[in-house]
Amino acid sequence: MTDPIAPQILIVDDARDIREPLGQYLRKQGFRVRLAAHAGEAREVLAEAAIHLVVLDIMMPGEDGLSLCRWLVAHDGPPVLLLTAMADETDRIVGLELGADDYLVKPFNPRELLARARAILRRAPPEAVSPPSGQRAFAGWRHDPDALKLIGDQDQVVDLTSAENRLLGIFLDQPRVVLSRATLLDLTAGREAKAYDRAIDNQISRLRRKIEADPKHPQILVTEWGGGYRLAADVTEVG
C-alpha cells in the first residue's frame, strides 16, 4: 500500500503505452501517481491535488509540453522533468531556459527516470520562503513585493513570478555583495545546490529581461566570474 504522505508525481503524456506502465512502475517504487493524457487534464489535476513533480512530455496534441511548462514556472508550480524525442535538441534547450528542472530523452530506462525524479525531489524546498515586505527603489525601479511587481521611473509596470520576486528581494537585501549560486539556492528556496546551478541562472536571465535595458550586457544584475552574481546598484527604502 502506498504511503499517503509519499510524494505525488503527475505524468503528462498522450501515449498510453508510456503513461500507464510508467505510472505502475513509480507506484511500485512507493510514489503516489496521477496520470494525464493532455495539458487540459494536467491542469485539472494540479488544481485539485498536491503534486510534487510533473513528468511532462513535450510533444502532445493541442497545448504542448513547453506551453504547460511555461505556465507551471510562471505560477511557481512543482518541478518539471521533461520527456523529449531524440531529435528535439532545440526543445530541450528551450525547456531548460523556461525553467524545467531536468529532461530525459525517449526511449528511456525507467530506472534512470526514477533516479532523476528522486534527485529533483531531494532538491525541492519543503515550503516556500516568504518574500520581504516593504517597497524599495534601485536603478530606476521600485520593487513592490506584496504585489509581485516592478514599477519603473516612467510608471511602466512589470509583473514578477513568485520565484523572481523572492530572488530579487534577496539581491535588494544585500546590494553590491557577490552572492554565489549555492547561496542563492539556499536563500530562495532552501534547495540543495548540487547539480542545480542552472535553476538560478535561468531565473537571473528572466529577471534581466525584465529590468535591464540590454539583457545581453547587464548593468544591474552583473555576473562575477567564478563567484556568482551581484546587484550593482544602491537600494533605498520607499516610504
Image: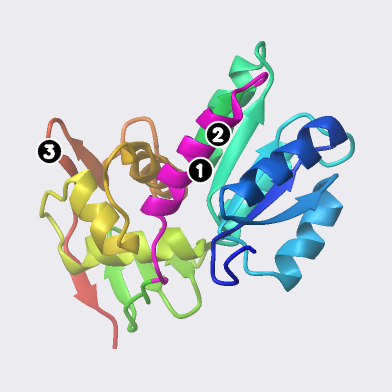
Residue linked to disc 1: 117
Tags 1 and 2 in contact by the CB under 8 Å rule? yes
Q: Quadrant of the C terminus?
A: bottom left
Q: Residue at x 61, y 19 (%)?
A: 90
Residue for badge 2: 113
Mark in front: 2 vs 3: 2
Asked if residue 57 can be seen in this view, the reply is yes
Q: Position of residue 97 (x, y in %)?
A: 51, 35
Q: Position of residue 198 (x, y in %)?
A: 36, 37
Is 161 in front, or is 112?
Answer: 112
**Above or below, 190 relative to 39:** below
Does 129 sit left or right of 103 as displayed?
left
Where the N terminus falls, by quadrant?
Answer: bottom right
The Cα atoms of the two marked residues, 3 and 1, are separated by 29 Å
Q: Earlier in the sequence, mark 3 or mark 1?
A: 1
Amino acid type of the residue that numbered disc 2 sits on in the rendered structure: Leu
User: Does 155 sit left or right of 211 as displayed?
Assistant: right
Which amino acid, mark 3? Gly
Distance Cα–Cα, label 1 vs label 2: 6 Å
Span colored in magenta: 106-128
SS type, badge 3: loop
- The residue lying at 39 percent from left, 43 percent from top is 199
Q: Secondary structure at mark 1?
A: helix
Residue 48, x across and y down, in percent: 74, 72
Magenta-span inclusion, residue 194: no
Residue 153: tell me if it is visible.
no
Q: Name which quarter of the figure residue 225 lies in.
A: top left
- Disc 1 marks a residue whose amino acid type is Ala
Residue lying at 69% horizontally and 19% vertically, measured from the top left = 85
Which type of secondary structure does the marked residue at label 2 adopt? Answer: helix
Residue 119 is covered by the magenta coloring: yes
